[in-house]
Amino acid sequence: MPANLTPEYFKAEQWFRSAATSDEKILALEQMLRVIPKHKGTDHMRADLRRKLSKLREAPVKKGGKHTDIFHVPRGGAGQVVLLGMPNSGKSSIVGAVTNAKVSVADFPFATHAPVPGMVQYEDVQIQLVDMPPITADYIAPGQVGTYRNCDLVGVVIDLSDDVAEQLGACLDFLESRNLLAGGETPAFDNQGNVLGKRAFCICSKCDIARTGAKEELEELRGYPWELLEVSAETGEGLSDLGRKLFELLNIIRIYSKRPGKPADMSEPFTLPAGSTVMDLANAVHRQLAENLKSARIWGTGVYDGQNAQRTHVLHDKDIIELHFS
Ligand SMILES: Nc1nc2c(ncn2[C@@H]2O[C@H](COP(=O)(O)OP(=O)(O)OP(=O)(O)O)[C@@H](O)[C@H]2O)c(=O)[nH]1
Ligand SMILES: [Mg+2]
């Protein structure tokens, strides 16, 4: 009996083949099992997939060894934003223009072959922006998906001087077929049950040489409510807005800590997810001491200066907090 496999299944199979880690292989196999047509003709295949899955789940985690994963980018700053785009779309030029990272910019494709992180300064916070090797409709480096899996936000770079439909298609295909997007139809979960989908936005590059109507075409095609930011690494247009945009899209707040009787330390804010409470800040300041939090005073939004705040009080960007531990 024919298996009648669907394009969705072939995408999941491609994901499995390009997965470099066991965790990623498990996610891909789960997806293959979810989308494989369920009838007599696929009985053997499904049994085989289940066998592979349980083998991977049972495999002991390897320790030690010298293998380093080039796609593992240690986090830095207040959030990690990873660029995604086709060859020559301008990713390295953007990272090179807004950070001190040493990137390779070239007019030939695949000039970048490993992630290169840099730091973008926005007011008093630093945000990590990661240049990446390109993807194409046919090729994705094994393990590359891992960098996206671990980031906070994906910056999809679309070159406005080139075919936007083709670029968007390749990027969406990559993100959707690996269940990387928040709001996707079949979200993946980690083994704690957390949804793995990422938020994304669009950086429209090379706006100095944009094709007429390219941005409008992209707006129409994007399919997700992604924000679009037009930039040019050549003229600098839009780049001064990038830090603020990343800060807003990361959905984080800055909190300044203050010691009793001393002025607040305004040099290095704590950064927390929007919606965080006084107790979340106490945990960020000192995990062990947090349980001993006795009281807190707050200066900032919606409070009078020095007001006592409950542990559950929701903080706002730029609030100043004085924590008292017993
Ligand atoms: N006119 C113009 N050219 C640009 C701009 N940004 C990049 N370029 C040119 O586009 C080419 C590719 O730029 P890269 O930044 O290397 O592109 P990439 O996306 O990193 O390429 P890969 O590493 O292959 O993925 C280079 O020749 C750049 O000089 C821009 O804003 N305007
Ligand atoms: Mg590059």
Image: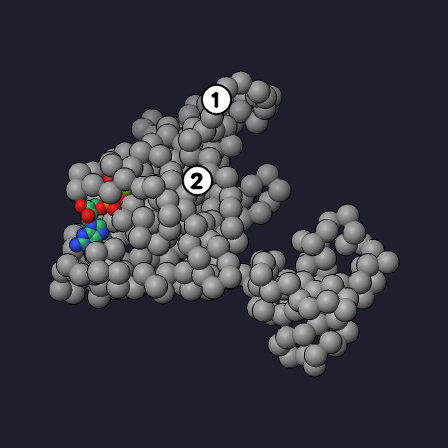
Please, what is the three-letter code of the amino acid marked with disc 1? His
Name the secondary structure under disc 1. Answer: loop
Colour basis: one colour
Q: Using a 10 Å C-alpha cutoff, classify the residue at mark 1 as few (fewer than 14 neighbours), some (14 to 19) or many (20 or more).
A: few
For the N terminus, the quadrant is: top left
- Give the mark nearer the N terminus: 2 vs 1: 1
> 6 and 265: which one is in front?
265
- Can you tell me whether the CB of the residue at mark 1 lies under 8 Å from the nearest atom of ligand 1? no
Q: Mark 1 points at which residue?
A: 67
Please, what is the three-letter code of the amino acid marked with disc 2? Thr
> 57 and 229: which one is in front?
229
x, y percentage for residue 39?
42, 33
- Can you tell me whether the CB of the residue at mark 2 lies under 8 Å from the nearest atom of ligand 1? no
Name the secondary structure under disc 2. Answer: helix
Q: Using a 10 Å C-alpha cutoff, classify the residue at mark 2 as few (fewer than 14 neighbours), some (14 to 19) or many (20 or more).
A: many
Q: In this view, does 256 lie above or below 174?
A: below
* Residue plotted at (24% across, 42% down): 105
In the picture, measured across the screen, residue 125 lies left or right of residue 266, that is: left
Query: How many marks do you count on the picture?
Result: 2
x, y percentage for residue 171?
31, 47
The reply to whether residue 218 is in sight is: no
Furthest-right residue in view? 326
For the C terminus, the quadrant is: bottom right
Q: Mark 2 points at which residue?
A: 147
x, y percentage for residue 273?
58, 59
Q: Is residue 245 above or below residue 153?
A: below
In the picture, measured across the screen, residue 74 lies left or right of residue 312, that is: left
The answer to which image quadrant residue 205 occupies is: bottom left
Query: CB under 8 Å between callouts 2 and 1?
Result: no
In the picture, measured across the screen, residue 297 lies left or right of residue 52, that is: right
